[in-house]
Amino acid sequence: MGKPNGVPAPAVRRLSLYLRQLESLAGRQQSTVSSRQLGASLDLTDAQVRKDLAYFGQFGHPGIGYRVEELIVQVRRILGTDKSWNVLLVGMGNLGRALMSYRGFAKKGFHVVAAFDNDASVIGQTVDGPRPIVVQRMEDMAKTVKSLNIRLAVLTIPAGEAQDVADRVLAAGVRGILNFAPVTLRKADCAVAAVDLAVHLEQLSFRLAGGDA
Amino acid sequence: MGKPNGVPAPAVRRLSLYLRQLESLAGRQQSTVSSRQLGASLDLTDAQVRKDLAYFGQFGHPGIGYRVEELIVQVRRILGTDKSWNVLLVGMGNLGRALMSYRGFAKKGFHVVAAFDNDASVIGQTVDGPRPIVVQRMEDMAKTVKSLNIRLAVLTIPAGEAQDVADRVLAAGVRGILNFAPVTLRKADCAVAAVDLAVHLEQLSFRLAGGDA
């Protein structure tokens, strides 16, 4: 089973959610699971589960369902989280420092190995995290990306600076960006995932304010 | 213009993005904007922008376009971020403490006024944030929600505890949940927005690993 092309993004997103469920089942020592059971906690039909997984391969066993540990290994391989990725972080404000200590990154094989800021008072500081890191000047990015083989960047910077920094990060050789800045980046040849907490909050307040409640 | 019902969630989500653009334009002292210009940085057509905004009212002026400051006021009112919301936070791990100091919440009118944990060694601790807060026992939640008129909860807890805590939070009178736990919550009569950083990371690594690149 090769790496599938053209899989719809929502199916890839649900693959992450299936993985979460499978890991939870494995933690409870459950060894097999049906597509119905796998979909239940995600409010998805068993047909939807089977259709989603079929994009990536044939994983079920007749009369058994899915073997939990086996499917976990397969899904991690498909998602690339069986590998280890070196990550850089730009922006050492509150959120940036917070993410430095976010254990979820390392758990998924994402290791923050470099940190950058354009504030002279922050450059040279040691920032705590799974491993302490000295904050570098933006000008040193290309060199660091190359020497540490960094493929992913996490941006926690103001909206107004995000596109410039994204361009610089890509020019340095990074191929994927996790963007916390509340602005949509013009994509070049890279994968961009946006995390905008304000959008989530506004969706909630819209509904609480009566817009859709 | 009343509060519209049944607006598709993606249109509400884009309304947040339009607001971000408008705030950026206002910061640059631009007083009017066309739907084409508003859509350009979001990769949306002018027709899409007009269709989205039409769900919420008639905002354009013939021959002028949109008045930036005027539209900002309207959109904030629609999204409910012209109001102030009291928020509680459950889970004082790394991410919880990080979010306590996340200035984006207060900027949008969301004020973290209470913090809870079930770890006896954490309860009673003072946690830094825009205002320092003493971490409370879960058992005191209902009383606090009532006395501080809390409508929203942010959950930064392990997946295995999330549903129980969500049920407790809702029973205490909270009406909306921003969920960072990597699990889908069974919704009762409340609005739930999920923030799963791992999903974002996995989407990126899927594409970097060659799945869709």
Image: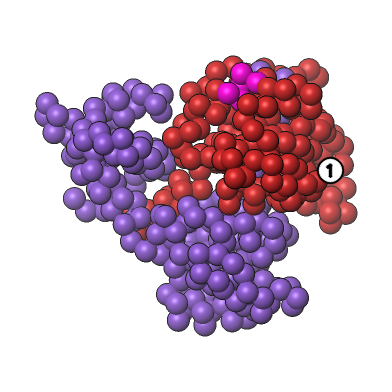
Chain colours: A purple, B red
Q: Is residue B150 visible?
A: yes
Q: Is residue B18 visible?
A: no
Quadrant location of residue A67? Answer: top left
Question: In terms of depth relative to the viewer, which is nearer, A33 or B90?
Answer: B90
Would you name the residue on which mark 1 appears?
Answer: B68
Residue at image location 52% in from the left, 59% down from the top: A177
Residue type at mark 1 is Val
Magenta highlight: main SS: helix
Quadrant location of residue B90? Answer: top right
Residue at image location 69% in from the left, 58% down from the top: A94
Assign a secondary structure to mark 1.
Answer: helix
- Picture quarter with the C terminus of chain A: top right
Q: Is residue B182 left or right of residue A3?
A: right
Question: Residue A155: where, in percent of width, then height?
Answer: 60, 61
Question: Residue A109: where, in percent of width, then height?
Answer: 40, 59
In reply to whether residue B88 is colored magenta, the answer given is no
Q: Is residue B44 left or right of residue A118?
A: left
Question: In terms of depth relative to the viewer, which is nearer, B174 or B54?
Answer: B174
In the displayed structure, would residue A1 be above or below residue A199?
A: below
In the displayed structure, would residue A212 be above or below residue B118?
A: above
Question: In terms of depth relative to the viewer, which is nearer, A159 or A118?
Answer: A118
Task: Identify the subunit bearing mark 1.
Answer: B
Instruction: Point out the stretch of residues depicted in magenta.
Output: B168-172
Residue at image location 55% in from the left, 64% down from the top: A129
Question: Residue B43: where, in percent of width, then height?
Answer: 60, 48
